[in-house]
């Protein structure tokens, strides 16, 4: 049980830090030696099945050397869908390529318009419809057991967006956990690029501010009245926060007792279908693989009938998908 707690805690920190912090926080070289889970046998995604997909009439197969994982950040205190359920506020695709020992980080705009399952609030029946991808984190029910199904629905929506890329392993964490872990490392210093005093008087534009857990949630979550009010600017702010968190985490000193206490505080915020071995493998790769790129999906934010919508540049997305995930068949 203690080994499992350590593994899941490491992975929870990784979720918050966009696939980097688990490699530096909590002295992985010391802690990972205590984890003896079985490495992933290749079932981390569906690349081993080599399913053929067709893009613009040409045949592609998933790269056999690439394994993909889906990370979902849930906003339980913010926006909800028509059924009153929390939305997927933060979506990240993490891809490891064993051919050159690199990994790619791909954040997905929550406002991205794509095909998702939409549930009727009365009948509970689902139908496919084009909507914000954030709304995909729903299965029409309110039970805790449905959380895994909600993650699968988001995974399906991401697959629809990325021309069939599929994910067997996913993990979600409510964004409230960010504040908890920020407080455990003693706060995070960030540069506030533009004025955010309407969100909190401490977030003065052009100044470096020490964020505690509460202020960190405001910094990464604020949208209305900030900059251009689109999720694009919020994503940039989130990336700046995570980079700053990494620097802080390198100097953080938490003993095993503190680690376990932190786990107890955040474990209820985590949902994952990945076992200890897979989590251990991800942490190991984060420590030993080199970050290749943070890939930004091109597109445009527009005001829709009710909400902001992000419409992807399909030609640009095709270039990304065929470069990161697929190879053309002969």
Image (tube, rainbow, N blue to C red):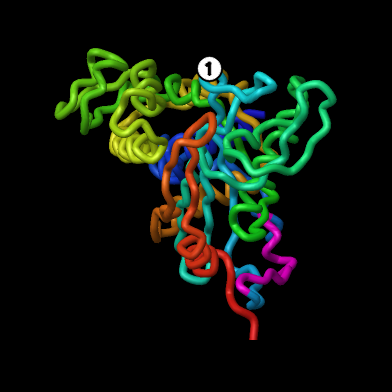
The residue closer to the viewer here, 111 or 59, is 111
- Measuring 61% from the left and 38% from the top, which residue is drawn there? 171
Q: Is residue 81 visible?
A: yes
Left or right of 120? Residue 35 is left
Q: Is residue 52 magenta?
A: yes
Q: Is residue 77 left or right of residue 169?
A: left
Residue that carries the numbered disc 1 in the rendered image = 77
Location of residue 25 in the rendering, given as x and y in whole percent from the top left corner:
40, 37
Q: Residue 8's x, y, as percent?
A: 59, 34
Confirm whether residue 245 shows in the render: no
Q: Which of the 4 image quadrants contains residue 155?
A: top right
Left or right: residue 250 compared with residue 205: right
The percent coordinates of residue 217 (x first, y second) are 40, 22
Front in this rendered view, residue 172 or 286: 172
Image quarter (top left, top right, bottom left or bottom right) of the N terminus: top right
Callout 1: helix, strand or loop? strand
Task: Pick whichever, 197 or 294, lies toward us.
Answer: 197
Q: Residue furthest front?
A: 305
Tell me where the magenta segment starts and ends, as one range. Answer: 44-56
Mark 1 crowdedness (10 Å alpha carbons): few <14, some 14-19, many ≥20: few
Q: Residue visible at 66% across and 51% down?
A: 167
Q: Position of residue 50 (x, y in %)?
A: 71, 70
């Amino acid at each position: 049980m203690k080994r499992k707690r350590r593994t899941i805690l490491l992975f929870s920190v990784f979720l918050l830090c966009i696939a980097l912090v688990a490699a530096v926080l909590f002295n992985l070289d010391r802690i990972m030696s205590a984890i003896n889970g079985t490495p992933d046998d290749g079932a981390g995604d569906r690349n081993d099945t080599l399913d053929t997909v067709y893009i613009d009439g040409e045949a592609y197969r998933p790269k056999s050397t690439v394994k993909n994982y889906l990370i979902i950040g849930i906003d339980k205190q913010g926006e909800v869908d028509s059924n009153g359920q929390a939305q997927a506020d933060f979506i990240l695709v993490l891809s490891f390529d064993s051919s050159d020992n690199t990994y790619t980080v791909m954040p997905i705009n929550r406002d991205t318009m794509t095909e998702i399952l939409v549930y009727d609030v009365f009948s509970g029946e689902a139908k496919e419809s084009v909507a914000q991808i954030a709304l995909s984190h729903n299965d029409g029910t309110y039970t805790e057991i449905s959380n895994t199904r909600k993650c699968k629905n988001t995974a399906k929506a991401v697959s629809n967006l990325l021309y069939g890329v599929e994910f067997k392993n996913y993990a979600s964490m409510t964004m409230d956990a960010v504040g908890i872990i920020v407080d455990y490392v003693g706060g995070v210093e960030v540069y506030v690029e533009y004025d955010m005093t309407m969100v909190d008087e401490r977030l003065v534009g052009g100044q470096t501010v020490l964020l505690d857990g509460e202020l960190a949630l405001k910094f990464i979550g604020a949208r209305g009245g900030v900059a251009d009010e689109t999720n694009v600017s919020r994503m940039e702010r989130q990336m700046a926060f995570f980079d700053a968190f990494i620097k802080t985490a390198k100097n953080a000193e938490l003993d095993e007792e503190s680690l376990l206490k932190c786990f107890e505080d955040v474990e209820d915020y985590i949902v994952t279908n990945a076992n200890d071995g897979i989590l251990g493998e991800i942490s190991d790769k984060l420590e030993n693989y080199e970050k290749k790129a943070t890939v930004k999906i091109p597109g445009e934010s527009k005001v829709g009938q009710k909400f902001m919508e992000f419409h992807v540049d399909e030609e640009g997305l095709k270039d990304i998908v065929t470069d990161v995930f697929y190879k053309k068949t002969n």
